[in-house]
Image (spheres, rainbow, N blue to C red):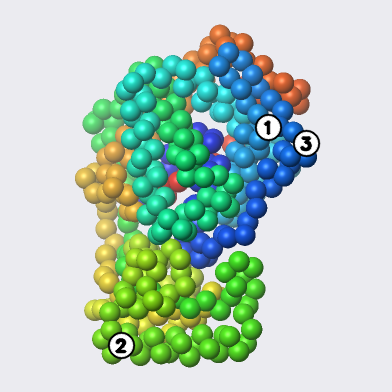
Amino acid sequence: MNVKYILFAALAATTVALSSAYADTPNTMAGATNSQDAVSALFGDPVVAKGAGVTIKQSDLDQVVSGIKSAAAERGEDVSAGQMMQLKAQMLERLIDIQLLLQKANDADNAAGLKKAQDAMAQLHERAGSQETLDMQLKAAGTTEAQLRTKVTQEATAMATLQRVLNVTVTPDDIKKFYDGHPSDFEQPEMVHVRHILLMTIDPTTHEPLPDDTVKKKRAEADDVLMKARSGEDFAKLAGEYSEDPTTKDKGGELPAFPRGQMLPEFEAAAFALTNNEISAVVTTMYGYHIIKFIDKTPAKTLTLIDTVPGTDQTISDRIKEVLSQQKTDDLAPAYLETLKKAAEVQIVDPDLSAEVDALSNTNAVPVPRATPGGK
């Protein structure tokens, strides 16, 4: 499904380190450091924007901008030097908007934000595969699970508040019209569902190749594990015992179903060639030696409104409603948010940022990359 929905800025900053799937690299991020803490220790953490109920520090903005840049890099995009000040200005405005909207939230908004945050955190736990892996990823992102949960809750609560005060509604007819008008967006390609066991031939931290003698031992071990699997031993148990993929070993090596074009070519070719509980030969990729076991395949199909978005518990209908609500909100929000800023007497302390924010309000700004977690 090609439909994308826009979140506010803080969520982008904190989910970027959690967004990589096995298709790109094993999620082994131990040893990363939070450079923002070091910068703050050296130069302090000045306030860059303030107003009634609003305080945005430099570290808040830096974290958001860093997250957006990293999310763009993961998609092969780049934030040019010319876009950087514009990016900072846009993200600063969104951080201000969140703090202003949270002051307007009622009990229903808070409940909606909490539910959205619980769903988002559950997806992150599922993607990470284990608490240990999630904790490593959060550490690499310079945050903790509690801090992330707070930010996600604030994001979702602010959005619920904005849609309530703007009286944003989406009818079943709106949903059906969008669905009928975008048929290609709901075409799901053939998907394959497999388990795998990975014996890594690179250092999980540096990604440098392991010594040749170690690689030879890994290959011998892979051949031994393959023999055990093909002789009838439980593949899931073997994965839990031998696999070095931290995102799947605690799940018996199970990967989410995937289409062509998401995995490494060697892995993908072997997976799609399997049928009927077949187990592959040892497959070599840049990360090491894999043994793959077929679970099932899903033929290409057109998703209906009651089908779920792949990888989530959300129906297509609910996702379209979310997208359309966001579009309507984007149209109505600027004027309302401007009134909130004036009422709160918001000031942007940094003169360069202030000038850029003024420029953005008077021009059609070039879009900057945004994170789009939660599916394509």
Mark 2 — residue? 230
User: Taking 11 as reference, is 233 left or right?
Assistant: left
User: Taking 82 as reference, is 97 left or right?
Assistant: left
Which numbered disc covers residue 43? 3
Q: Earlier in the sequence, mark 3 or mark 2?
A: 3
Which numbered disc covers residue 58? 1
The amino acid type of the residue labelled 2 equals Arg
At a point 46% along the width and 87% down the height, the residue shown is: 221
Which numbered disc covers residue 174? none
User: Taking 43 as reference, is 337 left or right?
Assistant: left
Q: Which of marks 2 and 1 is nearer the N terminus?
A: 1
Query: Pointers 1 and 3 in contact (CB under 8 A)?
Result: no
At a point 62% along the width and 34% down the height, the residue shown is: 60
- Residue 226 appearing in the image: yes
Q: SS at mark 2?
A: helix
The amino acid type of the residue labelled 3 equals Phe
User: Taking 21 as reference, is 211 left or right?
Assistant: right
Q: In which quarter of the image is residue 223?
A: bottom left
Q: How far apart are marks 2 and 1 (CA)?
A: 57 Å
